[in-house]
Image (cartoon, grey):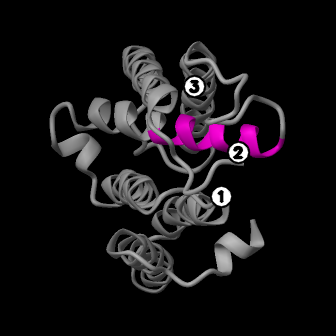
Amino acid sequence: MKADFLRPPRTVAEYGADAVRVIGVLSVLVAAIWSMPTDAGILALTTPALMLPRALGMRGGVDLAVGVIVLVAGASNVFDLYRTVPGWDLVVHFVCTGAIAATGYTVLARLGVVVPQGAPEFRPRIPIVLCTILGLAVSAVWEMIEWAGRTFVTAEIFVTYQDTIGDMALGGLGALAAGVLVAFVPLEKRPR
């Protein structure tokens, strides 16, 4: 992981993914100086997800896609797009949860918990089922963070039963779609 993280970028997509990481870190600093502490905190939550694909040695295009998706999800909160753009919340839950579930599968494969892509024992049904489960779990945690934020930080965070269930349902569907992607498209640069 360390070697993948420290390796210089080689492709346009890898340079783009690194640029997204820099933007992500700078956005936390900008929000900490010129915005609300909650905005800086929300953007800070994106930084591990911005760094992980690089550390895992994911393909440049996958790394770039995950970075953009996660950064857009965090920035959408800061710029209040979830409240002002109808349906945006559902789109982001679908896409972002899928990206996180696919990355989660790669983490579990790297840790030896599941069969990695490209291994002789790999079966397409494994990531389809597991990514869906991961996505539903991530969706539940996401909604708990929203609830905790509303309960303990600010009542401006929008949380209703219908919103929570809709977010979790779309997150689960996005994770299912990601599972299909992981079943047939290699995410890492080289097989493990």
Return the residue at label 3: 131
Determine the residue positioned at 45% across, 21% down: 164
Q: Earlier in the sequence, mark 2 or mark 1?
A: 1
User: What x and y, as percent, mark residue 118?
Assistant: 62, 36
Quadrant (top left/top right/bottom left/bottom right) for the N terminus: bottom right
| Residue 127, disc | none
Q: Is residue 89 left or right of residue 28?
A: left
Number of dots carrying numbers:
3
User: What x and y, as percent, mark residue 55?
Assistant: 66, 65
170 shown above or below 41: above
Asked if residue 146 can be seen in this view, the reply is no
CB under 8 Å between discs 2 and 1:
yes
Query: Is 178 or 82 nearer to us in this picture?
Result: 178
Question: Magenta stretch?
Answer: 99-111
Amino acid type at mark 3: Cys
Query: Residues under labels 1 and 3: Cα distance?
Result: 17 Å
Amino acid type at mark 2: Val
Residue 101 part of the magenta segment: yes
Q: Is residue 97 left or right of residue 125?
A: left
- Kindly state the secondary structure of the residue where label 1 is placed: helix
Residue 44 part of the magenta segment: no
Q: Residues within 10 Å of mark 3 (few under 14, many from 20)?
A: many
63 shown above or below 154: below
> Dividing the picture into quarters, in which one does residue 98 lie?
top left
- Kindly state the secondary structure of the residue where label 2 is placed: helix
**Magenta stretch: dominant secondary structure:** helix
Return the residue at label 2: 107
Query: Is 67 or 39 nearer to us in this picture?
Result: 67
Asked if residue 17 can be seen in this view, the reply is yes
140 shown above or below 56: above
Return the residue at label 1: 56
